[in-house]
Image (spheres, rainbow, N blue to C red):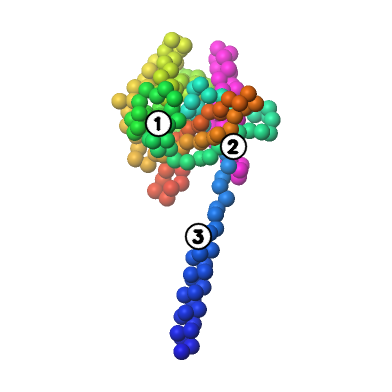
Amino acid sequence: MKNKVLKTLVLFLFAVLGIFSMQKVEAEVIYEGYKISKQDITGASVPFIYVKSSDGEVENVYCFNLRLTYPPTQWEGTNYPKYKKEEANSNQMDRLASNKRLSGDELRDAILKVIYYGDSENGNRELQKKYRLSDVQFHDITQKAIWYFTDMADASNNLQHDALKAYRELIDIKSKTLPENIKLNIYTTTEQDKDYKPYQNLLSAKILNSNNTIHTR
């Protein structure tokens, strides 16, 4: 009899703990977006966009929407737009891209390839070294290559020499492959600037190890 009562009590406690676990909501990580302008070798200003999580982690990201507003400059104020981070899917990207060159999985894969081969901060510097580009130049052509697919914006007429060659190679996605464990993150916001203009959505790509940690190339 005692064993039966004890068994019933244990089952009851497990049920209560299960209900409590289901009701517990983990605090969502909030990201703030801002930009820092850097100069290339010609003296032109190139915006770098960053997101900073509520736990202090900072990541360099790329703009998804050419015609929307950049996040404010760092130190311009404390009211940075808040972003939600999630893994990008094809339907979401179709919806957010205003004038896309490709659709569905083709758009997602194109952007992944551009960031994978054009993101020097993740260690992929082969293309940058091939054309002897500075970090600022390389970042600039990678951003322009993303807009080539998301906004049908061709920057060929605005680039010269090695930067133009690197840009053309970067948008030649048919010649490129991707690792299986690469993940495209999208940071979305519904906030607007003081003139009621929507802020850009943002992108980053990461390679994951088998234990789901970020792989550094």
Q: Are marks 2 and 1 in contact (CB under 8 Å)?
A: no
Question: Is residue 196 found inside the magenta-colored segment of the image?
Answer: no
Give the extent of the magenta segment: 34-60
Question: Residue at the spot x=47%, y=36% of the render?
Answer: 186
User: Which residue carries the number 3 mark?
Assistant: 22
Q: Secondary structure at mark 3?
A: helix
Give the overall secondary structure of the magenta segment: strand
The residue that label 2 is drawn on is 82
Residue 165 x %, y %: 39, 15
Mark 2: amino acid: Lys
Query: Which residue is more in the foreground, 173 or 131?
Result: 173
Q: CA distance from mark 1 to mark 3?
A: 33 Å
Q: Where residue 179 sits: x, y (%)?
A: 35, 37
Q: Secondary structure at mark 2?
A: strand
Q: Which residue is mark 1?
A: 94
- Amino acid type, callout 1: Asp
Q: Give the image location of residue 126, x and y in percent.
A: 41, 26
Q: Earlier in the sequence, mark 2 or mark 3?
A: 3
- What distance separates the C-alpha of mark 2 from that of mark 3? 27 Å
Residue placed at 60% from the left, 22% from the top? 37
Give the residue furthest to the bottom: 1
User: Disc 1 or 3, which lies upstream in sequence?
Assistant: 3
